[in-house]
């Protein structure tokens, strides 16, 4: 499918969101088995678990609150008519739980069919006040500097994930694809073109170079990738008293989620 990098102008109601979800369920139910296993990866604070909760439908409850830092593999299901996609979220912090999760997901005899790679264009949520103050002391004082710093760290995290995926591909010829979920786009809706240039296969830069090199190594017959803008929990982002505001409405967020689900359904179909 052709990915749109424009924020939807529609302001559909909750009823329309439910209609779109029903369409999505119908698409997936035609193609998927009971347990189509996918991995969700990304840096700590990128929004992996929140995105999973929205894809699974859990986050649309009135009492939903985003979870804190994950210390173990998170599990979720994207419901369909009698079938399901199983999602395993790998912790983002570079500690023992993450390494163990990587080994379980990519080193086992039950390899995942695909990977959702969650990025957030530098808007990584840092929940540690000590870490935040250390960065400011080191000169990462503006929001622009913070985002550049986080995108550099994101590349290191991507390298580690691609290393694990190579291991799995050598043994099992899986995962067969990766979708880059360009999340939190409500915070940079005016700059989606720049995000597309940085994260999508049509773009250029270090992120794209790493994935294109990976594609050359494993072969286009064995692997494919795409990028898609998406948004989940809508909230402002603050760094050192500088704020970026959420610029889209919940119905627009829902339509972006719908587009992402459609892409996910097409990749699971192939």
Image (spheres, grey):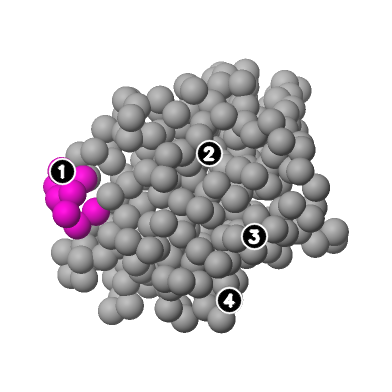
Quarter of the image where the C terminus is located: bottom left
Q: Nearer the viewer, residue 121 or 239?
A: 121
Q: Tags 1 and 3 in contact by the CB under 8 Å rule?
A: no
Residue under pointer 4: 81
Residue 55: x and y, percent?
A: 60, 59
Density class for disc 3 (Cα within 10 Å; few <14, some 14-19, many ≥20) is: many
In 3D space, how far apart are the residues under numbered discs 1 and 4 (Cα atoms)? 37 Å
In 3D space, how far apart are the residues under numbered discs 3 and 2 (Cα atoms)? 18 Å
**What range of the chain is rendered magenta?**
215-223
Sequence order check: which comes first, mark 4 or mark 2?
4
Task: Tell me if residue 230 comes above or below residue 197 in the rendering.
Answer: below
Which mark is on residue 123? none
Which mark is on residue 21? 3
> Residue at point 64% right, 64% down?
22
Q: Nearer the viewer, residue 227 or 109?
A: 227
Secondary structure of the residue carrying tag 3 is helix
Residue 137: x and y, percent?
A: 60, 23
Q: Quadrant of residue 1?
A: top left
In 3D space, how far apart are the residues under numbered discs 2 and 1 (Cα atoms)? 25 Å
Secondary structure of the residue carrying tag 1 is helix
> Residue at point 61% right, 21% down?
190
Residue under pointer 1: 216
Sequence order check: which comes first, mark 1 or mark 4?
4
Which callout, 4 or 2, points to the residue nearer the camera? 4
Question: As drawn, is 206 to the left or to the right of 26?
Answer: left
Residue under pointer 2: 229
> Residue at point 49% right, 45% down?
181
Q: Is residue 218 magenta?
A: yes
């Amino acid at each position: 499918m052709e990915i749109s990098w424009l924020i939807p102008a529609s302001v559909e109601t909750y009823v329309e969101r439910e209609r779109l979800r029903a369409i999505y369920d119908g698409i997936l139910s035609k193609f998927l088995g009971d347990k189509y296993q996918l991995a969700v990866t990304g840096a700590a604070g990128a929004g992996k678990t929140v995105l999973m909760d929205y894809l699974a439908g859990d986050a649309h409850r009135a009492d939903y609150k985003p979870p804190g830092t994950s210390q173990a593999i998170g599990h979720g299901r994207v419901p369909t008519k009698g079938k399901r996609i199983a999602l395993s979220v790998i912790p983002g912090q570079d500690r023992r739980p993450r390494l163990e999760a990587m080994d379980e997901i990519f080193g086992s005899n039950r390899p995942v069919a695909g990977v959702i790679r969650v990025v957030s264009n530098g808007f990584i949520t840092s929940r540690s006040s000590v870490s935040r103050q250390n960065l400011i002391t080191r000169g990462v004082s503006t929001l622009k500097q913070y985002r550049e710093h986080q995108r550099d760290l994101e590349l290191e995290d991507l390298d580690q994930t691609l290393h694990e995926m190579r291991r799995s591909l050598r043994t099992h010829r899986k995962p067969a694809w990766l979708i880059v979920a360009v999340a939190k786009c409500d915070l940079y809706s005016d700059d989606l073109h720049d995000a597309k240039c940085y994260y999508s296969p049509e773009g250029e830069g270090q992120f794209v170079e790493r994935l294109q090199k990976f594609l050359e190594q494993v072969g286009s017959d064995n692997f494919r990738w795409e990028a898609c803008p998406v948004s989940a929990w809508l909230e402002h982002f603050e760094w050192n008293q500088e704020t970026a505001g959420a610029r889209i409405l919940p119905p627009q967020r829902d339509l972006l989620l719908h587009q992402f689900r459609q892409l996910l359904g097409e990749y699971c179909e192939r």
